[in-house]
Image: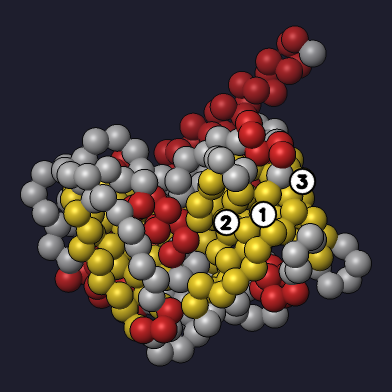
């Protein structure tokens, strides 16, 4: 574990654990499965669209593996969470999604994550691949009428497109990759390069594969969008098993290390 990851882990607040039961499983598209989960404890559940949950799923060797999935929708009356999972590969998450049955119980922690819509903006931009689609859809659907929204989403093909119902003024572009997800998606990077930044103050949310997210973020910064107006996070990258990559600035890491030192000093002083 890196020093930065260790600092983040030690400063991270304890998140509640929820015991959830699967009540519905269906395919939203051929490669996206929706698992609906309920739990009486969810009466006190609260989250921001764009946040995710950490699920403990069978690892295939008799133990458990943690996988993060964005909350697609929460129905407060039914106390039901909908989680959309990409059916790609043979990892623990995809395997669990294929095998989960009604009545199965799973533990989840959260909500967690700093990705989301924040502050006032004249326009908002969302970009990502299918791993980002549940979060992007949840955030867009939560926006009110009058919001000006642009979205670029890359999926395998037309069959993987999903309707996004929102009161906002949405301009949505689908990119068709015609194959499995790849690192540093040229299609997404080029699409954001061609995107004309509207006048006024904007906010961008860029999520998906880490290398593609980093390239898109740097491109937006180079074109004048302030760093503070860009929420960016890598949901996956080749060779990484679980977890997310936080796209942060060196000055943020310095401040984080300072906070960690202060935290240790206070613990030594006050016990």
Query: Considering only vertical position in the picture, is 122 above or below 126?
Result: above
Do the residues under discs 1 and 2 have CB atoms within 8 angstroms? yes
Residue at screen point 79% across, 60% down:
103
Seen as rendered, the residue at the extreme front is 77
Query: Considering only vertical position in the picture, is 10 above or below 164?
Result: above
Q: Which residue is mark 1?
A: 37
Residue at screen point 79% across, 13% down:
271
Q: Which residue is mark 3?
A: 19
Task: Point out which mark residue 82 bears.
Answer: 2
Residue 107 seen from this side: yes
Of residues 183 and 56, which is closer to you in this image?
A: 56
Q: Of callouts 1 and 2, which one flags the residue occurring earlier in the amino acid sequence?
A: 1
Percent coordinates x, y for residue 262 in the rendering: 61, 21
Tag 3 secondary structure? strand
Percent coordinates x, y for residue 116 in the rendering: 41, 45
Query: Considering only vertical position in the picture, is 241 above or below 232?
Result: below
Disc 3 from disc 1: Cα separation: 9 Å
> How busy is the neighbourhood of tag 2: few (under 14 within 10 Å), some, or many (20 plus)?
many
């Amino acid at each position: 574990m890196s020093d930065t990851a260790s600092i983040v882990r030690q400063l991270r607040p304890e998140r509640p654990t929820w015991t959830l039961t699967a009540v519905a499983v269906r395919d939203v598209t051929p490669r996206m499965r929706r698992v609906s989960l309920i739990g009486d404890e969810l009466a006190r559940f609260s989250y921001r669209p764009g946040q995710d949950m950490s699920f403990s799923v069978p690892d295939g060797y008799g133990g458990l593996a943690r996988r993060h999935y964005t909350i697609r929708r929460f129905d407060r009356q039914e106390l039901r969470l909908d989680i959309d999972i990409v059916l790609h590969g043979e990892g623990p998450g995809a395997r669990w999604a294929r095998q989960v049955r009604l009545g199965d119980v799973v533990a989840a922690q959260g909500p967690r994550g700093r990705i989301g819509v924040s502050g006032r903006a004249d326009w908002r931009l969302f970009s990502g691949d299918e791993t980002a689609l549940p979060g992007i859809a949840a955030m867009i659907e939560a926006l009110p009428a009058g919001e000006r929204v642009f979205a670029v989403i890359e999926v395998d093909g037309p069959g993987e497109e999903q309707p996004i119902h929102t009161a906002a003024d949405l301009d949505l572009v689908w990119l068709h990759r015609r194959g499995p997800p790849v690192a540093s998606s040229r299609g997404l990077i080029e699409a954001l390069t061609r995107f004309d930044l509207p006048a006024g103050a904007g906010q961008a949310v860029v999520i998906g594969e880490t290398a593609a997210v980093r390239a898109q973020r740097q491109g937006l910064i180079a074109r004048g969008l302030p760093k503070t107006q860009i929420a960016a996070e890598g949901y996956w990258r080749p060779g990484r098993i679980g977890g997310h990559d936080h796209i942060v600035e060196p000055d943020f890491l310095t401040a984080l290390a300072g906070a960690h030192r202060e935290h240790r000093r206070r613990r030594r002083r006050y016990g």
